[in-house]
Amino acid sequence: MSRTVTALRAGRPGRVAVELDGVPWRTLPLEAVLRAGLRAGTPLERPEARSLARELRRLRALDVAGRALRYRDRSSDELDGRLRARGVSAGERARALETLASAGLVDDERFATSRARALADRGSGDELIRCDLEKRGLAAEAIASALASIEPERERVERIVGRRGATPKTARYLGSRGFSEESLEGVIAGDLSDSIG
């Protein structure tokens, strides 16, 4: 037995109250109602109900991802994990990430470069940066490109040594921040293998 959409009434901003057979049914996002093709006087049969459900799932996935992006950029892998944790199906996750990428809201290259620069500005070495980007699920090419875009590690070492002094303590500090022994050579006098260890 099919039910008929008898009225669509504006609700809160971006929401529509749907009435079926003269009885209030649900308040839905306007975009889902429009994309599913609901109109007053049309029956709400199985194909329309499926279309509406698909649109609601799509909007939910975009909403979850949009909230995750509200305060900072994220990698597509991080967003996929958030969507998975919220119970979004693999197909809907892929569609949401594709939509966000085509809108320019998700860009792993941009994210990798931005994150690498932020970590380098905070005194991190290339190895720490590489590990951080790998942990965020970024591709090796994006990581290599991001590392190539930042100030060379040796120059960052020289700046930090200029501030802190060329001491074994500074060498240990730099080693703990992911700087390679190769970058430390010549900047800090003495045997680095003894100082860093």
Image (tube, rainbow, N blue to C red):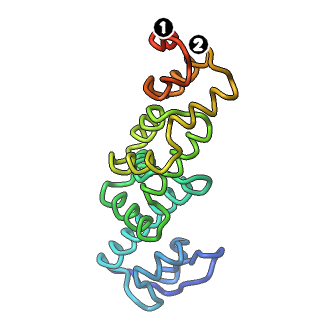
Residue annotated with mark 1: 194
Q: Nearer the viewer, residue 60 or 174?
A: 174
Question: Looking at the image, which residue is at 37% across and 65% down?
Answer: 98
Label 2: state its secondary structure.
Answer: helix
Q: Earlier in the sequence, mark 2 or mark 1?
A: 2
Question: Looking at the image, which residue is at 38% across and 68% down?
Answer: 53
Cβ atoms at labels 2 and 1 below 8 Å apart: yes
Name the residue at the right extreme: 163
Q: CA distance from mark 2 to mark 1?
A: 9 Å
Amino acid found under the numbered disc labelled 1? Asp
Question: Looking at the image, which residue is at 55% across and 56% down?
Answer: 69
In percent of width and height, residue 113 lies at 49, 51
Name the residue at the top extreme: 194
Residue annotated with mark 2: 168
Amino acid found under the numbered disc labelled 2? Pro
Q: Is residue 104 left or right of residue 170?
A: left
